[in-house]
Each structure stands twice: as C-alpha cells, then as structure tokens.
Amino acid sequence: MHLVNLLVDGLSLGLVYALISIGFVVIFRGTKTANFAHGSMLVLGTFVIASLHSKLGFGGAVAAGILVSAVFGLLVNRITMVPTRDAGTDVRGIITIGLNVILTAELTRRLGANIMSSGAPWGDATLSAGGLRLPVSRLCALLVSVLIIGGFMLVNRYTMMGLSARATAEDPEIASMVGARLRRVSDSAWILGGVFAAVAGLFLTTYPSAGLVVGTSEIAILAFPAAVIGGLDSVGGAVAGGLLVGLSQSLVSGYHDRLGFLGNGFDTVAPWVLMVVILLWRPHGLFGKRPLYRI
Amino acid sequence: MHTTPWARLSGHRATGAAALTVLAVVLLAAPLVLPDFWQQLILFSGAAAVGAIGLNLLVGVNGQLSLAHGFFLAVGAYGYAYLGPGTGDAGTGSVGLPTPVAALLAVAAAGVAGLLFSPVAARVRGIYLGLASLALIIVCKQVLAGARTLTGGAYGRDIPEFDLLGFHFGDQSPYLYVLGKPFGAFDRLWYLVMVVLVLAYVFMRNVLRSRVGRGLRTIRDSEAAAAAAGVHVQRYKSLAFTLSSVYAGIAGVLLGLLFQHVVPEYFSLTLSVQYLAMIVIGGMGSARGAVAGAFVVTGIPLLLAEYSEHIPFTSTAGDGGLDTGVLSQFVFGALIIVILIAGARRPGPLLRSRRAKSGDPAASAVPTPASGPTERIRA
C-alpha cells in the first residue's frame, strides 16, 4: 500500500511538473530558446494569485495571475526574443538567464520571508479510500493537468495554429514560406508558456506544500530535468519527463529510510541525477529529435 | 593591414616596454597608496578574473555552455581548506598538509572534477549541456550541506592562511610595517593575486594563439569541420573542460584566502550565473574581456553598497525597500540582456571574439557555422 500511495503521489505531482515543462518545451519549440526564467515566471504568476485572492476571490485571482504571466511572456518575446531571432540558441538562453536574475531579485524582495497562501477553496482536505490517500488539491491538479494537456495536444494536432507551430518547430524558414506567421507562433508559444507556468504554480503551492515561498522557484526548476529527460522539443516527452521526475521524487522521499546514505533531501537531487544518466544514454532526451549536421 | 590602437602601441617596442614598466610599478606600489575599499575591490575582482578567464575558454572559445563553474570554484576553495592545516573550527576536518601543497592539490582536484564531467560534455551539446551542468550545481549544494567535516555545514568554515617559502600571507606572524603602515593580509595577498592573475592571463593568451586555441575555436564554429581538419574533437573538448576547471579551482583558492571564511551558500547557482555574466559583459572568447567583465560584475555590488547613500531610491537591506544588493542584480541582469540584444543586431554570430574577427585567419576560416537548418530562424 505504501508503494501504491507513493506512485499515486508521484504521478499527481509529476503531472504538475509536466505542466511546467510543457510550457518550457512549447517555448523551446516556438523560439528555439531554453527559458531559464521559467521558474521565476511561475513564481510571478503564483505571486499575483496569492496577493489578489482576498480582493478578487479565488477565481478572479487565478484569472489575473494567468493574465499577468501570459502578458509577461508576450513582452519577453517581443522585447528580447524577436530582436535576437538570428542569434543562436545559447545567446537567447543566456538572455533569459539575465531576465531570471532581474525577476528573481524583484520577487525575492517582494516575498521576503513570507509564506503566501494561494487561497485555494479546497484547502487541505484529503480523500482516503481503502488505505489510499490523496489530497483534494492533488486531485484537482490531476484533473486540470489532464484537461489542459489534453486540450493542448488536440489544438496542437488538429488546428491551423498547432500545425503552424509544429511546422515552425521543424524548420522555421520553410514554415514561413508556406504561410506560418512566425511572430504569431513565437508570441503564442510564450503566452502559452506563461499560462502553463501560472497554473502549475498554483498547484505547486497548494496543499501539501505550505504555500508560495522564495524557494518555490527552486522546485519549479525541476521542470528543466523533466523537459530534458523527455527531449526539449517533444511535447509528449515533457509529459513523460514530468511523470518520471515526480515519481523519482516521491519514491526517493518515500523510501528515505533505506536511502539514508545519500543524505537528507536527496529527493530534490534525484531528478537531476536521473537527467544526467538519461542524457549519457540518449544525448537529446528520450523523445528529442537528433539534429542533422550538414557540412 | 588593419591594426587596432593597442597593436600599434605594443608595436612600438620602447613605448610598450615603458607602459609595462609603469604598470608594474603601479601594481607594486598600489597596496601602499590605495584606500582599503579600492584595494579590496581590485583584489576580489582579480581573483574572480582568473575564474572568468577559465570560463571564457570553455564557453566563449570552445562553445560549451556551462552553468557549473561555481561547483569547480567550490572544489578549489573547500579542497584547499580541507587539505591544508586545521583552523580549529568546530566540526571541520583537515588533512594538515603544508598550504602550497594543499593549494596545488585542490587545484588539481578541480581539474580532475572537470575531467570526470567531460564525458557528459562529450556526449551532450549546446543548451542540453547547459541544463546538464545545472545538475552539478544542485548535487554540489546537496554535498556541501551534508558533508559537515568538509564544509562545516551551513555556518561554513575558516580558510587557513597561506604560506609560501616561509612568507606568511596573513595579518600577523610576523607583523610587518612598510613605510610606517601595517602590512596586513590584504596587502600581502595583493601580490599573490596579481602574480597569479598575470600568469593566468598570459598562459591563456598563449593557449588562444596556439594550435590548441585554433582547434578549440574551430570546434565551436563547426565540429564536423574541425574533425575534418584533423582536430581530435573529444580530446580537445575535455581538455577545455579540464583547463577551465583548473582556472576555477585557482580562483576558488584565491577567493577562499580573501574571504578567510566560506559558507556553502556562496557557491550557489547565482555564482555560476555571475561568472557567465562576466564573460558575456566582457566579451565572449577573449582573455581581456573576461578580466574586464570580472571587474564589472564584482565591482558593481561593492560600489553600489559603498556609495548607497548617494544613490536615490535605495534603502538598507531587509526593510523591503530597494536595497543595493537587489539594485546590483537589476544592473547585471539588464547588462546581460542589453549587451546580447545589441550584439545580436550586429551582423555575424556573437559568440566569437572581436579579436578573432579582426584578423585571425583560423577563426575566419569557417565563415558560417554549419549547425543545421534549425538555426536559420527568421520571422
């Protein structure tokens, strides 16, 4: 039963990571940029939710958080990504590192040592059936993630917008020749990245987590190993990677007493170790596309 | 032939020699005349510059993105502290070797750590490597928090003072006075840091101008072209990783000596990002740029803190206002973004040093990076 509980726990947590890393992967596919500011974007959206829920109510605050995060993504794309579209992946990755420095400094200043609650109506209620325990918050996370991820997959598969995005991910130049509008694709990628980050941030800071703290961005960067494990340009891979990261965390912390030799808090390190091992085996992740080098 | 002002200057041998002499005299006399604040600013910047030169070899010259530089600095600093004589700090262990031996072994340990990570670097490229190197920082944090005998836990540990051939780089034993002023640890370390920085700089310039440097640059521009031209790609890449870790190890030892006490929190991801900021701000791929960037990135927070009462809108740390620490983070972040956007608007790839553009035939032998169709983004 212990194991089943851990698996359920890991999978529900993993779906939240999947949500973050899908945002990361969508941005990577849309603009060939690894968004190192993704963790702080998540904190930004959650911060807005946590500061507004007493005024606007929970629903209004969530809408505001998603809006702020999406607009932020759009601005980042217009201000830093569009002017540098001819530069390499590394250059734009480093630009987002600069962005992360600024955003983290500001959010850390605003948050200080506070623990902010996101005001979720389900609080710390927990369902239990036959020895299986699941917080309602995780159940909501599960439902919302499945809905959002499923909806995104459908849009990506069956609409013109999704087709443009997929074509652009293959080859931007050829995609633009056949009518994909690259700025619109990159705009929508960053907006979606912001939306997913805010939603994931909400579930990352509700029960069993204590709330939004400065350290939340450190949990949020677990989306990086998730995205890398799945392959940076694969949406399905992001889901698989997120689940693997969630599972590895819950299993390591669940069997903590037998893994004591690895030291306290190894559950935050385990996903990174898993990532390095998988990269050694498959250098572009499990489902990532291997680039062809032309001479 | 195209010449830069500096080349013209050093072209005149007499002028060049005179300039070098003046520089040497200024450097020798500086600890006696500089105010403490400026002396410390230059010392910390100089130590950081050694690390930045190493990172620039890896990222700017060889094109391997690494966010793990802070890890190798930690290996240097803690390696020296652990191998050197004990400082009587509660709960910390030490081997008790003489300090020069401890320093050398610590630097070697950093190099070995780099060599051990290089198989990952050999398999993983570009942004995947940047993200993989993040793992080192996370693991480092875990190890530093857990290994109390090595790091002293969250409170950190003292760093033993350095001795070389009977000369003691500390405040005491013996007390020294030069021109009636006490000649303390920072004054003595000044010469150590400057000598190491000059050696590190000269060595890197020679590497960059040699066959190895050309090989490393060619790998950055196109691995396939480099392999076709006879460069042993994997060996060169792990050489770059090892050499850059050695530089980081040296910088770690120097910074440890300057701080006299190190805490694990210092070697966080922020530190690696700062070193990345140094080479971006100073200019990718040039040793001079790394030194300049190190002074900018190290100097900004110190200057802002020193002159905070003259800067409007700032407040003291901790009261929720805009303190100088936060302000300096804003400045770094903005500098990184602005410099890269401005650089990307120039024609040609940015990850190439200005020096290489202005006439190194090896660097311009590969005109366009053949990095595949994915790099040709247009909107």
Image (cartoon, coloured by chain):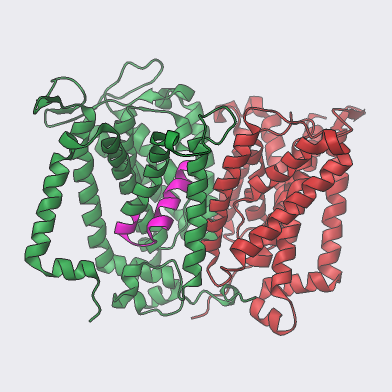
Chain colours: A red, B green
Residue A10 in view here: no
Is residue B347 covered in magenta? Answer: no
In this rendered view, identify the residue nearer to me: A119 or B261.
A119
Residue B206 in view here: yes
Magenta-highlighted residues = B270-290
A34 lies above or below A40: below
The answer to whether residue A191 is left or right of residue A152 is left
Image-quadrant location for residue B249: top left
Task: Please give the name of the residue rendered at 58% of the width and 68% of the height, measured from the top-left corner.
Answer: A83
B378 lies above or below A255: below
Q: Residue B206: image x %, image y %?
A: 22, 61
In this rendered view, identify the residue nearer to me: B63 or B318.
B318
The answer to whether residue A188 is left or right of residue A151 is left
Q: Main secondary structure of the magenta part?
A: helix
Task: Please give the name of the residue rendered at 45% of the width and 46% of the height, measured from the top-left corner.
Answer: B274
Q: Residue B323: image x %, image y %?
A: 52, 35
Q: Which residue sits furthest right? A: A129
Task: Please give the name of the residue rendered at 22% of the width and 56% of the height, measured from the top-left corner.
Answer: B203
Is residue B276 covered in magenta? Answer: yes
Figure quadrant of the N terminus of chain A: top right
Task: Please give the name of the residue rendered at 57% of the width and 44% of the height, measured from the top-left corner.
Answer: A273
The answer to whether residue B179 is left or right of residue B153 is left
Q: Residue B260: image x %, image y %?
A: 32, 27
Q: Which residue sits furthest left? A: B14
In this rendered view, identify the residue nearer to me: B365 or B29.
B29
